Every structure is written in C-alpha cells, then in structure tokens.
Image (tube, grey):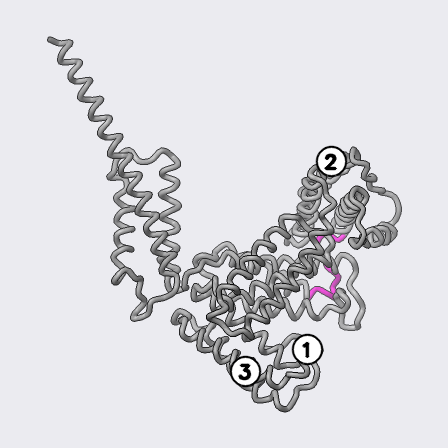
Amino acid sequence: MADSPAVRIPLDAREQPILDKLLAIRTNLELLKQDRSTYVKSQDVIEYYNQVIEQVVILNDIRTSKRHEQDRVDTVLDDCFQLISLAFLTIGKNHEAPAVYSAVSTMKRLLDHLKEAAFFSPNDLESIKGRLQDCRDYCERGKETYSPHLLTLLEARIQVCESILSELELSLSHLTPELRPMYDKLVSILRTLSACNTRSKFPTAEVDDLLEQLKEAQASLAAYGISPYDSTGSIEEKLAEMTEKLKISIDHPEPAPEAKSLIETLLQRCFLWVELIKRKRGKVDERFQETYDKLLDIRNKLEKLSLTQAWSLRETDLYSYQRQLDRIDESRVEGNFLDSNGAPADLHAQRTLLYLLRKSYAIIYHLIVSSEPVSEALLPIYNQLTTLRRCLLEVKKSGGVSSPRELYPYSMKLNSIDNMRVDGKFMIGSDIPDGQGSVTTLLEECFDLAYQLRTEAEANESDDSADEGDANSYATTKGE
C-alpha cells in the first residue's frame, strides 16, 4: 500500500530494522482483515498489538533527542495502530484503549474540516465532545492494562481534538436561543444542496424548493436586523464579499454583532451555492473528474455499508477507505485541490470535492461510534436477537397478543439460541469470543419481553373466561 504523500525527513539508519518489522506487522494485519474464511480472533490482534508496542519502545529510545521527527516509520506505525484499533472494534473490545485510536484520528479529520468549512451545527460539536469524553474514560480505565506509550500518544491526540473543539464552540457561543434554530436550518440547507449537487441526475425541483426555504429564512432573519442578501453583482464580486465575511475573529468576540455576521455569511453562502450548482448542474471541471469519481465511489460504498452495517461490516474494512481519503486530503495544497499543472480548482469543484471528502469521513465516524461491542463471531446471534427484540417491542406497542400461542415462534427461536450456550457461554469451537455480556443481556431482555406478553395474554384469557362464565350464569338464572 502506498503511504501518505506527506513530506518526510530521511530515514535514520538505526530505524531501518524498526521499519522492516512494522512493514511485516502491517502486512500481517492486512492479511488478517482480508481473510473471510474465519473471524478475527482476540489473541491474534493482541499479539500484533504487543509487537507494535515493542517497536515503539525501541523507537523512543532512539529518538530521545528528536521526539518530533516524522519519517516513513511514523507513517507505517500510524497504519499499524489504525489497523489494530479497527481490529479491536472487530473483536468486540470497543471500550479498550487501543480501539480509541481510530475514532480519535477520524474526529481530528472531522474537526479540521469543520474549522476549514467555517459552518457547522452545534449538534456536530456535541456529538464529538461526548465521544471524546468516552475516549478519555476508556484510556483512564486502561492505565493498568495498556502501554503508557500508547496512552501518552492517545492523550496528546485527544488534547488536540479538544483544543479545536473549544475553538469551534467559542465561534458559535454568540448564537442566542432564538437564532440557533435558524442557524441550524441554514446549515442543513447548505448540506442538502451539496448532496443534490452530487446526484447522478440533477434534482432541479428539490433545489428550487430549497431556494424557497432560503428566501423564507431570509425574511424571518430580517426581523433580527440581519442584512438581506444582495442579489446584484457578479458571482465573482459576491464570492469576494463572502470571503471577507468568512474572516470572523473569535479572539475578541462581540455578542450580537458576531452572531448576526455569522448567520448573514452563512445565508449568503447558501444563496451563492444555489446559483453555482444550478449553473453547473452537477458537472465538475474535467480537470478534477478523476478525483470526483474516486470520492463519489468511496462515498457511495460507505453509504451502502451504513445501511447493512449490522450484517456485513467488518470494522477493519474501513481502513482502506480511511487511507484513500487521507491521501486525497493530504494531497491538497493550502486547502486547495490542484490539477496536474498545479492550478487550483474553481469554487464549484473545490466545494464539491470537499463535500464528498467530509461526508465520507463523517460516515466512517458514524460507523465507528455505532459499532456494537460484540465480536464478529457472535454478530449473527446478536443481530438475530436485536431483530427479535425489535419485533417483540412492536408487538407490545400494538397491544400485545390475544393468545399465548401467538408467541410460539418467538419462544422457539429464543430457546434455540439459548440452547447454543455451553456452561452459560456462546462458544465458537473452543473459543469464547468477546461480547458475551452484551449477547446474554439482549437474550435475557427478549425472554423478559416474551414473558410479559405471555402473562398479559393469559390474564386477558382468564378475564374473557370469567366474563363468559358470568354471562352464562346470568342467562341460566334468567331462564329459570
């Protein structure tokens, strides 16, 4: 696999053996993730983790006086940690410190992109903030189990993410409760417009509807003293004006003016983007067609994965997508996509490519944080129980069953799954995969739901029998 295109310093000769070992480990990890004939086993992943940590210790001893150097060793080391982190998710060790690495790396990319885009929803930040705290908790719990070298690395990366997050939170702190819903609406419209721009067939009607929503938002914002959008002038003039307004200082914020400027700029960006995409109708500058096609393909494949995640995703599969995106992201110069001659993309191509890049990272983040803490070996059982639980909840929500006999299919399936346990454990051969607690808890919840429904059905039958008996008694007495 090709490494990231980032510039690296020459390799120290003493680091060559480390690089060779790490390359071998990376190859083994890639083979492990590609092997679909069996599930990924905990002992294999932990063995490779220990081998990587051994090389980190040796590397740190060599770099006692040059801690911040970055060469090819660091690139391959990052690959190894990324693969191990995703493998920890695959084996169900989601709440262990090594599993944090991949999540934090993805959050760092997302935060950088949010900062670069200069527009984002408070909900975006709240989600990442909560996840960062979870990562801190997992690292804290792993102090007695995992290498301090790994924990120090993770701590530094979490701190970087928290620093960017605080900066972004400060930029939105001026929004009042009244203005926040309007700001969220504009963010949603801008993202929907970008999604429309990447459809195989340009959705003119949907874009026109979004334009009407923008005009309604503009009318509502006028009551708050926010300047209406100026529809005069060329697109280039409006772009220049927009660029100036993007330079919002957060060092010395002024409450009301800052909030107004923030929303006004976003509103203007939305109108400008509508004009651009209606003019281009999804056609990207041919100089960047290859990059566009690659990013579109990655985005589409990740979206399919998100739809079938529970049944088909092996978390280590995300590694290849991450690395392809990283190479594209790091090939930009000062944030710009450049063609083969070094010329930057126009505004439409630039924004379109960035949207696909950011969207793909966002899907990867969603897949990572929604990964179940269950080994892939137990996922078929876990998914069946999840489906059973959903069905039983729907039955309960719709009023239950009229007879205990209607629960027979559910009971049969639950008993067949329960009978798979050996001494209370779900075994795969002689192995006891991770995630036993999650599967057992889900099984018990399904049994409880089935018992509640059966009890209610039996009680209803008893009431019906009693009512029927009373009616017969009344009829007999009346006949006499």
Residue depicted at x 28% and y 33%:
402
463 to 229, vertically: above or below: above
Q: Residues within 10 Å of mark 3 (few under 14, many from 20)?
A: some
Tell which circle, 3 or 2, labels the residue nearer the N-terminal end.
3
Q: Which residues are magenta?
A: 280-290
Q: Tell me the amino acid under the disc marked 1.
A: His
Percent of width and height locating residue 42 = 41, 71
Could you say where residue 283 lies in the image, as x and y percent from the top left? 72, 57
Label 1 with label 2: CB-CB less than 8 Å = no
* Amino acid at pointer 2: Glu
Residue lying at the far left of the rendered structure: 480
Point out residue 196 in the picture as x, y percentages from the top left corner.
66, 50
Could you tell me which residue is drawn at 57 percent across and 60 percent down?
A: 364
Which type of secondary structure does the marked residue at label 1 adopt? loop
Q: Is residue 75 left or right of residue 310?
A: right
**Quadrant of the rendered image containing residue 168:** bottom right
Q: Residue at x 20, y 17 (%)?
A: 471
Residue where numbered disc 2 is placed:
216
Residue 17's place in the image compared with 329, above or below, is: below
Distance between the alpha carbons at the discs numbered 1 and 2: 52 Å
**How far, Cα to Cα, is label 1 from label 3?**
17 Å
Can residue 471 be seen here? The reply is: yes
Residue 256 lies within the magenta run:
no
Q: Is residue 314 visible?
A: no
Kindly identify which numbered label has been placed on residue 55: 3
Q: Nearer the viewer, residue 50 or 8?
A: 50
Task: Tell me which amino acid carries mark 3.
Answer: Gln
Q: Which of the labelled discs sits on residue 68, or is there none? A: 1
Q: Neighbour class for label 1 at 10 Å: few (<14), some, many (≥20)? A: few
Work out whether mark 1 precedes mark 2 in sequence or the reverse, and give the earlier one: 1
